[in-house]
Amino acid sequence: EDYEELDLTPAEIYEYLMRLHAAGIIKGSEGNLNVNSGIKRAEMAVLTGQIDDYIKNHDDDDDDSDSDAEDVESNLEDGAYTVGDIDFSLKLTYDEDDKTVTANLYADDEDAADDWDDLSNSDIEDDVKDICDEIADAFEDDADITLDTIEITFYDEDDDMLDSFDYDVSSGDLD
């Protein structure tokens, strides 16, 4: 059977046909699909045209912003981040629904916990705000996404939490 070349089961093919029918892309004969009969060359040409038109008319910008957001995440994760003299690696998660980024920073340095304790709160907060501004600006500039909140957490060399903050992007305030 030809469907085996697609690596799909007959049930999966049927499901895709039903989705195309429900979306109005394929109409069938007199509004009914006869999935057990063959398809003529002319019918296939019409079907292919309908699918092509549907794709062209439903090509949203959301798909592009998802891709752009993923690119921003990847670019930011390749960067270097410092609080005081402690170097961190970044792991991001973007929540499109809440316009929130969760940023987890992991210490690259040994003795990060001791070094963190030696920093003043104001120095920590200034560096954290700088990191959050960099993240927010990258999403805005490169993906045209305005974030609401950045939840940022720092971990020491043993993956123990050093501190956690919520950054309100519009006000620039840390909670």
Image: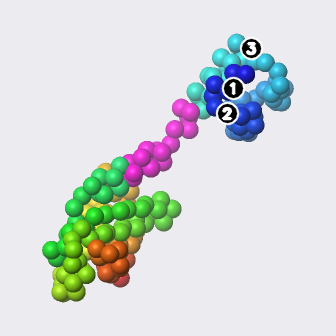
Cα distance, mark 3 to mark 2? 22 Å
Counting residues from the N terminus, which is met first, the one under dot 3 or under dot 1?
A: 1
Which residue type does callout 1 highlight? Tyr
**Residue projecting furthest to the top:** 41
Q: Callout 1 environment at 10 Å: few (<14), some (14 to 19), or many (20+)? A: few
Residue position marked by numbered label 3 in the rendering? 40
Quadrant housing residue 93: bottom left
Q: Whole-percent x and y of residue 47? A: 67, 23
Residue position marked by numbered label 1 in the rendering? 3
Left or right: where does residue 109 sit relative to residue 50? Answer: left
Colour scheme? rainbow
Write the residue at 44% across / 50% down.
Answer: 66
Q: Callout 2 environment at 10 Å: few (<14), some (14 to 19), or many (20+)? A: few
In the rendered view of the protein, which quadrant contains the C terminus?
A: bottom left
Q: Callout 3 environment at 10 Å: few (<14), some (14 to 19), or many (20+)? A: few
Counting residues from the N terminus, which is met first, the one under dot 3 or under dot 2?
A: 2
Asked whether disc 2 touches disc 1, contact meaning CB atoms under 8 Å apart, the reply is yes
In the rendered view of the protein, which quadrant contains the N terminus?
A: top right
Left or right: where does residue 5 sit relative to residue 30? Answer: left
User: Which segment is the magenta one?
Assistant: 55-70
Asked whether disc 3 touches disc 1, contact meaning CB atoms under 8 Å apart, the reply is no
Which residue type does callout 2 highlight? Leu
Which residue type does callout 3 highlight? Lys
Write the residue at 38% across / 48% down.
Answer: 68
Cα distance, mark 2 to mark 1? 6 Å
Q: Is residue 20 visible?
A: no
Q: Whole-percent x and y of residue 91? A: 35, 62
What element does badge 2 sit on?
loop
Quadrant housing residue 53: top right
Q: Is residue 61 magenta?
A: yes
Q: Is residue 139 visible?
A: yes
Residue position marked by numbered label 2 in the rendering? 8
